[in-house]
Image (tube, rainbow, N blue to C red):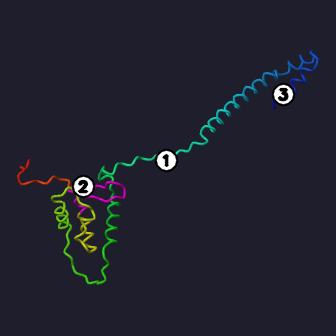
Amino acid sequence: VMAATLVQIKSRLLLPADERADDDENGPDPREELVRQLLEYKRFKEAAGRLEDRERLWRDVFCRDRVTPEEPASSELSLDDVTLFDLVDALNGILSNLPQQKIFEIFPEHLTVRDRMNVVLELLEGRESLAFVSVFEGAMTRPGVIVTFLAVLELVRLKLVRVFQGEAFGPIVLLRAFAPVTENEPLEL
């Protein structure tokens, strides 16, 4: 388009002056239109140059996803970080390590969640913490493991026991949520 406009302007300039005067009265000056088009072309060319500079600047830059820093191994995660699914996964691991019973005699077991809660609290007595897996050492049957697991969940719900996991996929630890009372210490009511 610009080349055609330039040819038109050149051809008008080659015409005699009296013919040019008649053409000027017929319409706008094509030189102004050409200047406007050239300025617009220049703006687009500069914008393309800036985009090319930006592309060249970021061509060899590769971003990676934001990585959260790992916490030190000594810090403990709160109960909010241990989900029910983590506990169920730990339970499945314990159940898979139980010896398979080949005798299928069914004996009624008199297991109660309350009794297993007392056993867990007795295991924690005199200790600051206890490995989650060690709670199940006395329960060698599937019903015993399941009742013990329910007892741990009930203790957590009652806020008598806290559950911590030091690192992702690390061992789960049970902690007393209450301070033991010694015989010499008076109770404050």
Q: Earlier in the sequence, mark 1 or mark 2?
A: 1
- Residue at horizontal 24%, vertical 69%? 137
How crowded pointer 3 is (Cα within 10 Å; few <14, some 14-19, many 20+) is rated as some
For the residues labelled 1 and 2, say whether their Cβ atoms are less than 8 Å apart: no
Which of the two marks, 1 or 3, is nearer to us in this view? 1
Residue 47 shown left or right of residue 104 in the figure: right
Tell me what residue is drawn at x 30 percent, y 51 percent: 76
Under circle 1, the secondary element is loop
Q: Nearer the viewer, residue 156 or 180?
A: 180
Q: Is residue 5 above or below residue 66?
A: above
Residue highlighted by disc 1: 65
Which of the two discs, 1 and 3, labels the residue nearer the N terminus?
Answer: 3
Q: Is residue 103 left or right of residue 38?
A: left
- Relative depth, front residue between 11 and 63: 63
Q: Which mark is residue 5?
A: 3
What percent of the width, then of the height, locates residue 58? 59, 39
Identify the residue shown where x is 92% and y is 15%: 17
Q: Secondary structure at mark 2?
A: strand
Which residue lies most toward the front here? 73
Cβ–Cβ below 8 Å for labels 2 and 3?
A: no
